[in-house]
Image (cartoon, rainbow, N blue to C red):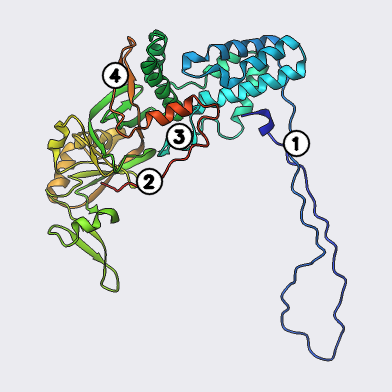
Amino acid sequence: MNARDFLLPLLASAAVVPSAVLAAQTAQPAPAAIAPQPDPLAVAPVPPVPVELPPPSWQLDAANELLGYIRQVGRDGLDPRDYDADRLELALRGGDPMTIARAATDSFNRLARDLALGHVRGAARHQWYVVDKDLEGDRAQQLLMRAVGTMRVAETLNSLLPTHPQYWSLKNALSVAKPTDTGAINKIRLNMDRWRWLPRDLGSRYIIVNVPGQAATLVENSQTRWKRRAIAGALKTPTPQLSVNATGVILNPWWEVPQSLSASVAGKGGYVAVRGKDGRVQRWRQPPGPANALGKIKFVMQNPHAIYLHDTNNRGLFDAQARFLSHGCIRTEHILDLAAELLSDDAGEYDRAKIDEVLASGKTVQANFVKPVPVYIVYFSTAALTDGSLTQYNDLYKRDGRVLAALTDRDGGLKTAAPATKTAAK
């Protein structure tokens, strides 16, 4: 964020010329009510004039530290040219304090923004619905003043980097990659940026689903607590990237058939029609049972995309190598085990025996977690091991090319347009 973005509104006033024309008195009684009429002489309010605040004063040592950081920012997969290193160096050579202050402040704000939130933005992220509040409010200005005031520029900027171990494994892989292996380097860089899209603090306990990796993982205190195979959205119904809190599970769930699939189940046995007052079918539902598409359980994850984790009535599909088969939701292997762990956490009343009892009853029951669990559904096409070796996943949705193009663009692909893709809940 540039210093010019920190605006101080001015007070604005509107002068109004009052009407002094009075209606002549007559013997007739006045109307009960007279609708107010706009005053043609009224002056419209003048909008506040933006005021550009002067940048803070930079000591030469701090500005030089910033320049050095920018020159080395390629180690985080970013391009030094995006942060005007040449302009800052020229300003330092000139020695004018105000020129240095402007150049350093502009570079710092742009760099801080990309380290915290990622360089790629807008439609180039495609189906990205994760809210990142790492620079919410006036935090960007606070970081700037902290860096300038303490003369700890590098330390301040480093405080914005992702804390997830996978980011640092990718960073290490980038440092040992052969300069001629542009394919691997590009894969590393674009996936490092995807980690910056996420909040820096994902929580002490969370579920992360990597769609290309076709896996769901429960993480606690930065350690993998539980991990199983997953089935994600097919090419025609891709799973969006989102974050949502899971508040509990529904045992023996009904499946509310999405409108996009209604025609395929209409009139078939095992489905119940929901009719309106006029008797017409509005939608279809599938009751609990062995044939239910959601299986025995689904997670309660309220979101506008109707995407959630659930079981399946066709568990043999988990043995397939390519598991992009759903209509957008995440079918999760052994999801009852995951539910049992989360429901019993924090002294919860449900254990596996109680879950099995409810399932055997056939009744639809919602069981809530004591504390909500964040769920992140993401799209990482490359992972790195601690030794720098890489694991490549199938970029089925062909998103890497768009992200890489935006990563090499100065504005991060902000102007890139992308059509919206609808998903169905199953």
Picture residue at 49% right of the left edge, 37% below the top:
416
Residue 239 percent coordinates (x, y)? 32, 39
Q: Secondary structure at mark 3?
A: helix
Residue picked out by circle 2: 303
**Which mark is in front, 1 or 4?**
4
Say which label, 1 or 2, has the lower sequence index: 1
User: Marks 1 and 4, Cα distance to the nearest angstrom?
Assistant: 50 Å
Picture quarter containing residue 145?
Answer: top right
**Which mark is in front, 4 or 3?**
3
User: Marks 4 and 2, Cα distance to the nearest angstrom?
Assistant: 31 Å
Picture quarter containing residue 129?
Answer: top left
Picture residue at 29% right of the left edge, 74% below the top:
278
**Which mark is in front, 1 or 2?**
1
Q: Which amino acid lies under the numbered mark 2 shown in the image of this protein?
A: Asn
Q: Which amino acid lies under the numbered mark 4 shown in the image of this protein?
A: Thr
Q: Residues within 10 Å of mark 1 (few under 14, many from 20)?
A: few
